[in-house]
Image (cartoon, rainbow, N blue to C red):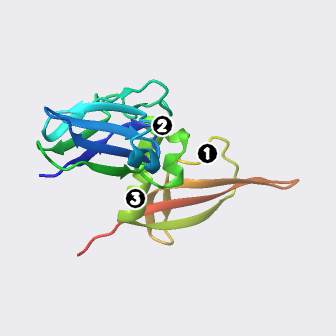
Amino acid sequence: MSFAIIEWNLNPNRNWYVKLADAGSDISVKLYATQADAAADTNVVAEGTAEFGTDSESTLIMKTGGTPEISLFNEALTYHIKVSGADSDAQKTYKITPFVDLPGINHNIYRSETLIQQKAITEINSHTHTSKIRDIGIAAHIPELKTGDTINIQSALRDINVLSTTTEVLIIATPDTLINQIETVQYIDLSHE
């Protein structure tokens, strides 16, 4: 067996350097903010221990003067890092990176569980479905229509009866009229049949 990091639950969600070493009766886990600090074993941000074995949980304790301050990214979990390793494994230093490198997900607004779920659904849809986008002019203004609404599109002429999600709502005004122009997206499952 060799020391390995299985999972991490660190906030802030950024690049970290983690040194795993045999501490005699357990695994020593040290957290650093930079690679240089990890190499020199200086400026330890936090440290803890984990039992030898697989999927061992380690809750880290901040060192005096350690920065940045860490916390649990997902507070429903009780550990900062899960590791695996056996007695007398060679010391290893790992670089762990943010959970996702997409800018929209790293943004603080996605700390909300509702927004995380909506973003995840969008990402899943964009990689497992094709999207059919329609621009539709509505001859009347509908004040309650907003982005994200699900609407039913029906057309006997084009033989369409589908549910779509509104992705854009434009209000077009002239001196005589007020109408809506909307963009909708319908996700169609990609199958291998």
Residue at the location (15% across, 48% down)? 89
Q: Write down the residue under mark 2.
A: 111
Horizontal arrangement in the rendering, residue 73 relative to residue 86 (left or right): right
Tell me if residue 188 can be seen: no
For residue 85, which quarter of the picture?
top left
**Which of the two discs, 2 and 3, sits closer to the camera?**
2
Q: Write down the residue under mark 3.
A: 125
Query: Measured from the top left, where is residue 42 in percent x and y?
Result: 43, 39
Contact between marks 2 and 3 (CB within 8 A): the answer is no
- Measure the alpha-carbon separation of dots 1 and 2: 27 Å
Q: Name the residue at the front extreme.
A: 40
Q: Is residue 19 above or below residue 162?
A: above
**Which of the two discs, 3 and 1, sits closer to the camera?**
3
Q: Is residue 189 above or below residue 107?
A: below
Mark 1 neighbour class, 10 Å CA radius: few under 14, some 14 to 19, many 20 or more: some
Q: Amino acid at mark 3?
A: Asn
Q: Amino acid at mark 1?
A: Leu
For residue 87, which quarter of the picture?
top left
Q: Write down the residue under mark 1.
A: 145
Query: Measured from the top left, where is residue 192 in percent x and y?
Result: 25, 74
Q: Name the residue at the bottom extreme.
A: 193
